[in-house]
Amino acid sequence: MDIAPHAPAADGRVTHLLYLHGFRSSPQSAKARHMAARVAARHPAVHWWCPQLPPSPREAMEAVMQRVAAWPADRTAVVGSSLGGFYATHVAETLGCRAVLLNPAVDPARDLARYIGEQTAWHDPAESFYFEPRYVDELRALAHGPLANPARYLAVIAKGDEVLDWREMTTRYAGARIKLLDASDHALSDFDDHIDEIFDFLHLAVPA
């Protein structure tokens, strides 16, 4: 079901789209690849960027913000999944752009504190990284208060999320447009069922 009215369309269509993956994930996630393929097929004029994020939250956001600093904020949108949703909120609050959040992490400093140590990548078990204690403090430093403009946000939240609490997510993004799924899971394995609504919200530029 949908909670809250649709956000108003921006004055111009989005020409720059950023996708931020979650913890231990990568640009090879199913959602990221599906988004990339659809942008390439239907919105070839849109600049798409889905970086591999370093494990340090500070380094990740410094790299992202440095890259998007040259993008037109009023023509930019960001999509983030899980930890990437937390990051996407930071980007959207900083730039004032629209954002789509997919089962977004609300308090990753709290949740990821128990993952300090060696971690393997989801999409390539041969790759690993060390999640350092200082990263928890770096996450805390990226937290924002109430959303400056909730209408800029669409949050897709699954009650069946086995990792994050859907009640906490809906509370955090109160006032935003929320698509609350009665089931599904953390990975949004039914992502195809929601991609049309996501792209409608993003208001991406289309070929002339």
Image (cartoon, rainbow, N blue to C red):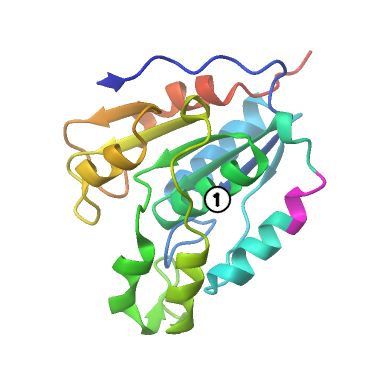
Image quarter in which the N terminus is found: top left
Which residue: 51% across, 22% down? Answer: 201
65 with respect to 189 (left or right): right
Residue 97 percent location from the top left of the image: 63, 34
Residue under label 1: 90
In the image shown, does 49 or 36 lie closer to the viewer? 49
In the image, which residues are magenta?
66-70
Residue 120 visible (yes or no): yes
Image quarter in which the C terminus is found: top right
Residue 57 to residue 82: above or below: below
Residue 37 to residue 134: above or below: above
In the image shown, does 121 or 11 lie closer to the viewer? 11
Which residue: 47% across, 57% down? Answer: 143
Residue 93 percent location from the top left of the image: 57, 43
Residue 96 percent location from the top left of the image: 63, 36
User: What is the secondary structure assignment of the residue under circle 1?
Assistant: helix
Mark 1 surroundings within 10 Å by alpha-carbon count, few (fewer than 14), some (14 through 19), many (20 or more): some
Which residue: 24% across, 39% down? Answer: 158
In the image shown, does 109 or 37 lie closer to the viewer? 109
Q: Quadrant of residue 122?
A: bottom left
Question: Label 1 amino acid?
Answer: His
Residue 15 visible (yes or no): no
Residue 3 to residue 86: above or below: above
How many marks are shown on the rendered structure?
Answer: 1
Residue 155 percent location from the top left of the image: 39, 34
Q: Main secondary structure of the magenta part?
A: helix
Q: Residue furthest right?
A: 70
Residue 149 to residue 11: above or below: below
- Look at the image and say whether residue 191 sits in the magenta stretch: no
